[in-house]
Image: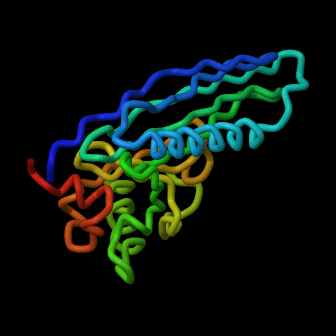
């Protein structure tokens, strides 16, 4: 694989009453069209997160949007978008949505697209998550059975990180719960033409 330089990530700030959003803006990729496609997807996702939080009518309401870059190498970008909102009640709520892109095309990937067609990635990942829950003594709201086929994830170097939203797996106090899995643990079912396939290559 030839060297693929990282894209440039800058922060665009948007403010409106009771809300401040820091939004990633991508530039410097091989294709301006791909950069534009990536930025459009990011913008749409940020809007969806904002709308998911409901209104800010409460006098004390506030919203804060921010992001974290997880992977920016080998033609793949993975990042997490966060939106915290307090709209009244005991505490605020934070949502997280992660996006993984092929930098040269702007394509996004669902969890299933990271693996070979027909492979039991749900079963394989669920076993690993279950073992980590036990090893880490994580208290779950219900006995853990399986991840969703479209479970939230991001790519971080040579790891696939599966995670659960607040209240999805455990009580609010636990926050987001992350399960890092080495790509080498899933090597036999990985789609070699996708993000995890690129991370398998030692170059």
For the point 9% across and 47% down, the residue is 203
Query: Furthest residue to the front?
Result: 32
**Residue 174: image location, x then y, percent:** 52, 38
Report the number of discs: 0
Residue 61 relative to residue 83: left or right: right
**Residue 56: image location, x then y, percent:** 84, 26
**Residue 167: image location, x then y, percent:** 62, 47
Q: Name the colour scheme.
A: rainbow
Q: Quarter of the image holding residue 46?
A: top right
105 relative to 194, above or below: above
Residue 47 relative to residue 143: left or right: right
**From where the camera sits, is residue 108 visible?**
yes
For the point 62% across and 38% down, the residue is 43
198 relative to 86, above or below: below
Q: Nearer the viewer, residue 154 or 36?
A: 36
For the point 45% across and 58% down, the residue is 109
68 relative to 192, above or below: above
**Residue 81: image location, x then y, percent:** 54, 36
**From where the camera sits, is residue 174 visible?**
no
Q: Nearer the viewer, residue 181 or 41?
A: 41
For the point 34% across and 41% down, the residue is 30
Query: Furthest residue to the bottom?
Result: 118
Q: Nearer the viewer, residue 105 or 173?
A: 105
């Amino acid at each position: 694989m030839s060297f693929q330089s990282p894209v440039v990530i800058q922060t665009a700030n948007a403010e409106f009453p009771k809300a401040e959003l820091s939004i990633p803006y991508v530039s410097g990729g091989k294709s301006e069209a791909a950069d534009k496609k990536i930025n459009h997807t990011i913008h749409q996702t940020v809007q969806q997160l904002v709308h998911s939080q409901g209104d800010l009518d409460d006098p004390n309401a506030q919203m804060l949007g921010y992001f974290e870059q997880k992977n920016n190498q080998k033609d793949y970008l993975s990042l997490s978008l966060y939106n915290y909102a307090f709209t009244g009640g005991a505490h605020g709520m934070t949502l997280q949505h992660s996006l993984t892109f092929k930098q040269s095309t702007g394509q996004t990937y669902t969890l299933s697209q990271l693996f070979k067609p027909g492979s039991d990635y749900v079963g394989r990942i669920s076993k690993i998550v279950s073992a980590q829950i036990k090893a880490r003594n994580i208290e779950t709201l219900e006995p853990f059975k399986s991840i969703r086929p479209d479970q939230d994830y991001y790519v971080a170097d040579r790891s696939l990180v599966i995670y659960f939203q607040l209240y999805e797996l455990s009580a609010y106090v636990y926050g987001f719960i992350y399960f890092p899995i080495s790509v080498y643990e899933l090597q036999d079912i990985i789609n070699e033409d996708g993000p995890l396939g690129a991370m398998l290559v030692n170059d």
